[in-house]
Amino acid sequence: MSQGILEAFNQYFEMVPALSDDLKNEVYKLRFQVYCKETDFEDPLNHKDGFESDAFDNRSIHYLIRHRHTKSYAATTRLILPDQNNPKKPFPIELHSTIDNIEPLNGVPRNKLAEVSRFCVSKDFKRRKYDKVDSLTGIHEESIKLITEDEKRTFPHITIALIACQIIISEKQDIHYWYAVMEPALLRFLSALGIRFTSIGPITEYHGKRKPSIIKVSDLLDGVLQKNPPLWNMLTNNGQFGLSL
């Protein structure tokens, strides 16, 4: 495509802050689909209402990625914010993994630290072939006809868009550092883009094998700018977000 990454993505998708109760319910429904139905990471019997949610949602900002033509939700993520009344209150990473490399945490203020979490994409927007689309995302056979070949080529950018959502949240909430517990394969993928998380502990079993990590958001953006300026444009909306981090 002759379009840039951001322009190609925006043509077919939009980033939606889930600020209302209705949109938050869309987040929880999509997470139920991905975590309970598609991957079996969570037991659906523990979420009989069809929503996947937990206690950290109340201190999180959520985003959705919406497909413009079908109005279906392709992906979601949240940023778990520090507890302003109790900055020492733990993040999930501190409860579910071992942090034995504390040097990268030196000098990191707790009120500027958040955790990237519930980073998921519907399998319908991962697939290259669209011959077996079910109705869990609201995408039916008739609506799939609206998805063009150009759109399919933008689907890998959904992962990058979720990171862009986190950058928007971070700027608005004055967050400068991210915790993350990620699959090693995802960490390698991000490193190839110039996004280099620092390991702070051994691989742990948490929805599969995950590695606890940390990154300074400004370092993330600097690394991408050096490696791939068009990708930096997408992450910052052409420099609109992230420059103050």
Image: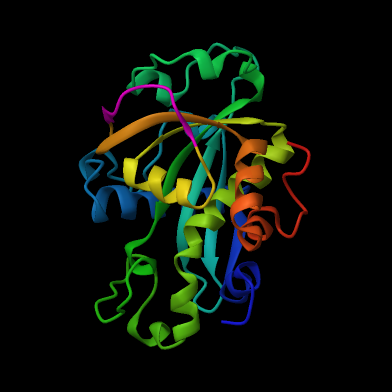
Magenta highlight on residue 202 = yes
Residue 35 on image: x %, y %: 30, 48
The residue sitting at 66% across, 51% down in the picture is: 225
Magenta highlight on residue 101 = no
Residue 177 against residue 166 in the figure, above or below: above
Between 218 and 157, the one nearer to me in the picture: 218
Q: Quadrant of residue 118?
A: top left
Give the magenta part as a residue range.
Answer: 197-205
Between 149 and 229, the one nearer to me in the picture: 229
The reply, left or right, for residue 40 in relation to residue 26 is left
Residue 56 on image: x %, y %: 47, 30
The reply, left or right, for residue 126 in relation to residue 9 is left
The residue sitting at 51% across, 14% down in the picture is: 103
Q: Quadrant of residue 4?
A: bottom right
- Name the image quarter holding the N terminus: bottom right
Residue 111 on image: x %, y %: 65, 20
- Render colour scheme: rainbow
